[in-house]
Amino acid sequence: MRVIQLLVLATISVLSPAYAGTHPVLNDNAETSPIGRLFEILVDDSANLRPSEAMVSTGYQKALLDVPNLLPTQSAYWLRCSITNETQDPSTYISIPYADIDELDIYLADGDDITQIAHSGRSIPKSERLGNPVAFEYKLPIPAGGSMRVLMRIRGFKTMHIPAMVAGEGVFPQARAERNLLLGLFAGMMLVLAMYNLFIYFSIRDRAYLLYVLYIIAISLAQLSYLGIGPFDIIGDNAYLNARSSLLFSLLAIVLGMEFQRRFINTKRYARGIQRWYPAVYALIFANMVIYLGIDPWLGFNIGNAICGLTALIVLATAIISFKNGSRQAGFFLLAWSVFLTGVVIFVLKDAGVLHYTLITAHAMPIGSAIEGVLLSFGLADRINILRQEKERSQVDALTAATENARIIRDQNVILETKVTERTQELQRSLNDLKEAQSQLVEAEKMSSLGQLTAGIAHEINNPINFIRSNIAPLKRDLLDMLKLLKAYRAQGASAEVAALEQRIGVEDTVREIQDILHSMEDGANRTAEIVRGLRTFSRLDENDLKPSDLNDGLKSTLSILGPQLRDRVKLSLELGDLALVECFPGQINQVMMNLLNNARQAAIKRHGETGGHIKVVTRQEEDQVVIMISDNGIGMTEEVRARIFEPFFTTKDVGEGTGLGLSIAHSIIERHQGHIDVQSLPNQGTEFRITLPNTQHMPQQKRA
Ligand code: ADP
């Protein structure tokens, strides 16, 4: 805004005609308007002329403006004019209501007599001041009807406007009262806006409100500083900071204003390109603050002015772009910002002499700031609606998202359940496999012990029984020889004593009895040999390899092991067909037969007791496979039992009577032989197991005998 000020002033200065004014005259009709044009101005480059030297210097130039505009240089300015008091009142006052003058000295010359009547300015500590800088007015003791020369020395590192006015007693206090009222209004209004929006910030926690409050505070402090009420005045007597406060607070207000704009308009969305440069502007401002405060205030002030102008344009451009892109908030901002800029322009035009110096034009900037603050506050109030709409939209979004999440979770649950079911089934299968493996181990161990036992017994009995069998024939032959001999003796005639003995013994009967005994011995020995052979076939411990076997033989041997248990209580009928050899593990197939026959026997006895039970075993060759059927007329099975009989450890029998392993083992053995085992059963009628086994195995990995 400072740049705009300067630009406007420069233009006006060039355009204004050279004005050869007279000196101000105070009479009863005098108006209080700036008398700048009546001054002569001297630029004191060395800045160390003394008042007496300055008073007589010839380098003065006529001022061109009502409110002279002194650019920031290291030089000092001297302003000179004569004032005539045509009133009857000896109290004349000069007022310069511009606070941002760094050094101001006023001298009054009466002939060669020069008196200093003011020594003040922002850079002068309060303790050293002469006159009353806060009231901006200094008494000039010009006697009624007299005329005196006034000399002012002005110096500073800022652009300084000199709205000098001359009036009699009582005029300036009136203006001051009006100005104070305006200031009070301004400060009060800004305070209310800040408090109101601070309250809203605490309610809804939207940072835009907090930034607005900070911006309002900073801009108020900047404006008050321009008007001579610097916070460093209030806090203490820090002339150094005090002299710099107006630009410092302006720069701070710019940063906060830009941040507020970003948040308020949502520039990220509406003016993405331009707002990316904001941090660079902040960095520039920070760097300039360092220069202004610590290095070179003249340079800092000029850069500061440039920054003010540049940022005013950037902020304006951002607002316009955002507005064009559809930001409703940008509309409010644009309006508020335009009002503020208008205030700046009015202020500048007033200093340039285009507009009259009035209370309003003199305070156009604070008024513009206040209206800007109010308009922005309206915008913030409107923002609540937008926030509410956004909140509602986000609630709807959240609800949609939650519903979607719920659906996904439901779907995932279904998938999970399916997976759990699959895994459970897999686990169940593994468990069954394990159980089966366990049962096979148990049974294999059992069968192996049984096999070893039977093999041992068979081996032990085999030799003695062979002795017996092989000795029976020679014994028979020897006995026949003895009988032949006996007959020969009898043919030669025996003595009476021998005949009586023969009579008493009953030789004929004895011979018959001996033959019977021999016959039954032979029979018993043969049967024992048969059992031993059966035992050996059954155990087949030596046969762990796949080898072609006669299944009828295997069956017979198994039956012979079960023999007495079966034959004594159950009727057994065999229909053994002609079978081709079956490639198998004979020991395992025998085990299957044994399990099936045992179950059939138990079921038949359970239903019929000691008599009436019947087991039928049928074998036959069907093409390239052998069929074995074992049926009984036992208790049969219900459908539920039938469905589970191949499960390991499934039994309907009492403890000690069954383990529930027999059929599961049978099933796995038959499967291993690439065969099938089926069952048909009806409760209280009977059961039939049907096994088919291929004659040849297709198991390359198996060891063949
Ligand atoms: P176990 O005989 O030790 O119980 P199995 O696996 O051999 O075990 O038999 C499982 C079940 O099948 C038996 O408990 C029985 O209920 C049924 N079962 C097997 N064979 C017959 C059959 N011939 N008649 C009736 N039920 C039978």
Image (cartoon, helix red, strand yellow):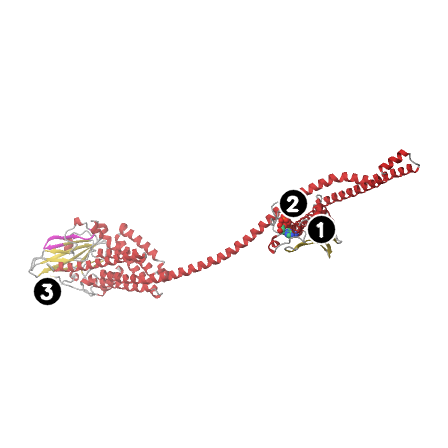
Image quarter (top left, top right, bottom left or bottom right) of the N terminus? bottom left
Q: Are marks 3 and 2 in contact (CB under 8 Å)?
A: no
Please say whether residue 667 is visible from this viewpoint: no
Q: CA distance from mark 1 to mark 2?
A: 30 Å
Q: In screen coordinates, is 659 left or right of 221?
A: right
| Residue 546 percent across, percent down from the top left | 71, 48
Q: CA distance from mark 3 to mark 2?
A: 138 Å
Name the residue that disc number 2 marks: 444
Does the stretch in magenta take in 112?
Answer: yes
Residue type highlighted by circle 3: Asn
Which of discs 1 and 3 lies nearer the camera? The answer is 1
Q: Secondary structure at mark 3?
A: loop
Residue type highlighted by circle 1: Lys
Does the stretch in magenta take in 497?
Answer: no
| Residue 284 percent across, percent down from the top left | 32, 54
Q: Is mark 3 within 8 Å of ligand 1?
A: no
Counting residues from the N terminus, which is met first, the one under dot 3 or under dot 2?
Answer: 3
| Residue 112 percent across, percent down from the top left | 10, 53
Query: 302 or 580, which lies in front?
Result: 580
Q: Is residue 464 above or below residue 132?
A: above
Which of discs 3 and 2 lies nearer the camera? The answer is 2
Disc number placed over residue 29 in the picture, else none: 3
Q: Residues within 10 Å of mark 3 (few under 14, many from 20)?
A: few
Give the magenta range: 107-123
Which of discs 1 and 2 lies nearer the camera? The answer is 1
Disc number placed over residue 571 in the picture, else none: 1
Please say whether residue 386 is visible from this viewpoint: yes
